[in-house]
Amino acid sequence: MIAKASKQVPHFQAIRSGVPYSSLDVAEVRDVRTGEILAEVSQVNAGVPRRDLLLSNRGKAKPRTFFNGLTAKELVEKTKQAGEIYLNGEIEIEGYGAQDSQAYIELLSGSTGLPKSLCLLNMEKVYYVLTHVEGVIEGLSRGLDLTIFDNNEIEHLGVPVCIYPEGEELAVILPSNSPGVNALWIPAIAMKVPVILKPGREDPWTPYRLIQSMVQAGIPKEVFSFYPTDHAGSEAIVELSGRSIVFGGDATVKKYASNPNVETHGTGRSKILIGEDLIENWRDYLDVLVKSVAANGGRSCINTSCIVVPKYGDEIAQAIAEAFAKIEAKSLDDPEAGLAGFANPTMAEWIDQSIDEGLETSGAIDLTTKLRGPGTRKVELENMTYLLPTVVRCDSLEHPLGNTEFLFPYVSVVEMPQTQMIDNIGFTLVATAITNDEHWKKELLQTRHIDRLNFGPMPTCIVKWEMPHEGNLFEFLFKRRALMRA
Amino acid sequence: MDLEKAKQVLDAYVREMIKWHFSEDTGCPFWLNWKKEAGWDPVAEIKSYEDMMRFDHFSDETLRDHQPEEFVPKAFLGRPFNVFETGGTTGMPKQRVGWDDYKVDYSEFSDHYSDDFFPKGESWLMVGPTGPRRLRLAIEHLANVRGSACYFVDLDPRWVKRLISEGHYDMARKYQEHVVDQAITIIKGRSIGSIFTTPKLLESIAERVSLPRMGIKGVFAGGTTMTPQYVRFLIEEVLEGQVNFAPTYGNTLMGLAISRKLTPEDNYSLTYYAPQPRAILRVVNPEKTKETVAYGDYGRVELTTLTKEFFVPRFLERDEAIRREPCHEFAWDGVGDVRPFGATTKKVIEGVY
């Protein structure tokens, strides 16, 4: 029975393998608009996760035993139940009482600057994975029966398959800009891999709500660790966890590039490529282009940040600019709101300046500013800073603004012959190739620097959780081994 | 000692020390030359500790720019001195001279703790900066006055700082491992009862062995910021609630300030008390340094060192702290929750070892 919600400030305790821990160091989570304190979060020093991880790997019970003999099938069912609690139920937060989904969205929106409409969208994304986790695991493991997580071996398509876990636990260093990324770690629980979550500074709400929903659904609490901590603490978690997922920019990707235990989710530089065979129909794809850039506030690595076309670059950029000019900053409560405010206005300032500096290099024109008027990219509303969607027509991918990504709806439009596209686009997290050219499709299928590939007019930001995203969680967590019996 | 008595003792001591440092037959060349330039006579004008405000802030760069011999008081001429250097600086080090001060400081520190806090007769281990630092001799003296021998594992903080400032984090980590490996070897292979080290090294050592299980009874640590949460973590987890803990605040110029015994009301917030009257700490308004801040407020730490061997007036430490009231253990102001000056407004690299 959960106590009634009070008007007090919620206090998020850290969780150490299921055991709540109140730190003497507390960080405040504030409303982006009013500065009101929305929550207090126990901050643990780096030594806390360090000792927990080191000592758990030294003689104490192995984290996998925390599942108390529950089968993967049972864990799947409980994960589904957790989905219902997460979407419609109440969880308890110390000093606050019961938090329903309404309050969750309210608070999440307030601290992240994400409109409520987008918070709900993200919530639905996460709910989908919780309630479809079996299918997601099936997709990731390519159809292996769930019992493989109970017995480590099964017969699949007449062939014996044996797996073992690559690490004792999965750590996730979460960002604050997109609550939906929590969907990534959810399948680990049904695969019997305990999770260690380091929440983003502005979003303790989502991982905590997920943990509590899962515990309420009957998943043993010992399976979860929740460490709000600083940079040193994050480093300790990544250093000592069996497997880690880290979000960050190019520097983060570079830092962990040679570490097989770490999967980095960095800058996506996702692109739409239109083939020479369909470029004459570009107007038919305008909605897909605009949605790819602007959905979810344009905050995600799977949002399009560059459109590469063999011709009509000027016309396409102009058409996108006209569509973008209709998008305005709206109140976080407005159901029509599609733009996220910046929790950190300095970040908005830096992005705005970076684009202006980039425009000083010849070969780039900001078509949205031409329509809206100079100095109108950065706007203030209700004490919050927004950046309005921006399209820059660039003469090449090498231009400073040609193949880059920002934390808002930003896209460059570049012209290039189809034959040069594959060799020049560089790493691309998601590429949507709009073409019927079978030969070119074959070439695209052969490329190593495109992580996810869509054929046809499909937004880059559509996610199919049954498919790999920046690596395959199952393959990241488990390795196959040969097993023979005499 | 009550507050009034402590004040009388301090004022009398200040007069005595000022006379010592500014008299031709006892003072050192540096301060005697300073007096010629200053245009005022400290011996005539300094009658109490409050009068010390006549002095400007001492710059520790002086200790880099002047030969140590200039700081040798006449009364010590002909007696070879120790040269002690500050921790992490590179280039020409800041150096101070000394003879017996460190022994006095550490004997007093020893007297503050019971025989079983750091068990008498059981060996010590120091893991930290040795070399040209006062600390190395001081810890050995501390062990010796408690009837113990002391083992040493060296750590060069200047090298660590350089590695970090040049971005060689892996190398810094390897070096720390190398230091900890040696410490573990000694702890496992010799009978150690007490340890001096830095909080971070203590943490690393305790990740490899259980200190109480290894027979460690007391730990004396200092050198970096310790927030209440961190102190609690050290006491509850690193020391497993079974090892005596003496956190201290100190440096080459001051000696060491002892922390008052923690009570539940402190909620793990440390308060240090300087070894008055030989060293005096004030918590001052950074903008108007002649003013102390109110009790309970943060301000910049100011140090005055006054011994026959060494005089440093009103040196502004690179730390800030909460001004705390006198307590039953110490009849003068304390400094609480010390942290790098400006820690809340800029990133400070500290506590690298």
Image: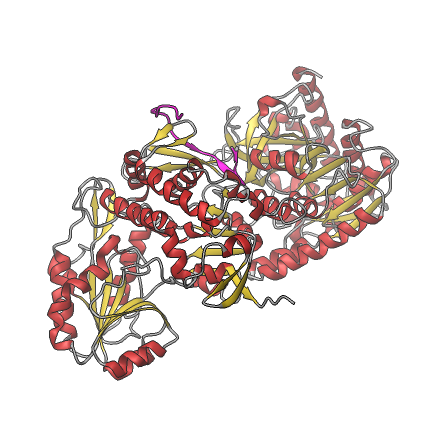
B243 vs A484, left or right, is right
Pick the quarter of the image with the N terminus of chain A.
top left
Q: Is residue A406 magenta?
A: no
What residue range appears in magenta?
A1-21
A331 vs A407, left or right, is left
Nearer the observer, B216 or A136: A136
A101 vs B329, left or right, is left
Q: Quadrant of residue B33?
A: top right
Please name the colour scheme applied to the rendered image: secondary structure
Q: Tell me, yes or no, if residue A122 can be seen here.
A: yes
Q: Estimate the x, y position of residue A20 in percent, counting from the top left.
A: 51, 34
Q: Is residue A11 magenta?
A: yes
Q: Estimate the x, y position of residue B186 in percent, counting from the top left.
A: 81, 49
Q: Estimate the x, y position of residue A151 in percent, counting from the top left.
A: 55, 55
Q: Main secondary structure of the magenta part?
A: loop
Count of marks placed on residues? 0
Q: Tell me, yes or no, if residue A114 can be seen here.
A: no
Q: Estimate the x, y position of residue B180 in percent, counting from the top left.
A: 71, 52
Identified at 29% across, 39% down, the residue is: A105
Identified at 35% across, 43% down, the residue is: A83
Nearer the observer, B298 or B23: B298
Nearer the observer, A166 or B253: A166
Pick the quarter of the image with the C terminus of chain A.
bottom right
Residue B194 vs B331, above or below: the answer is below
Nearer the observer, A388 or A470: A470
Q: Quadrant of residue A115?
A: top left
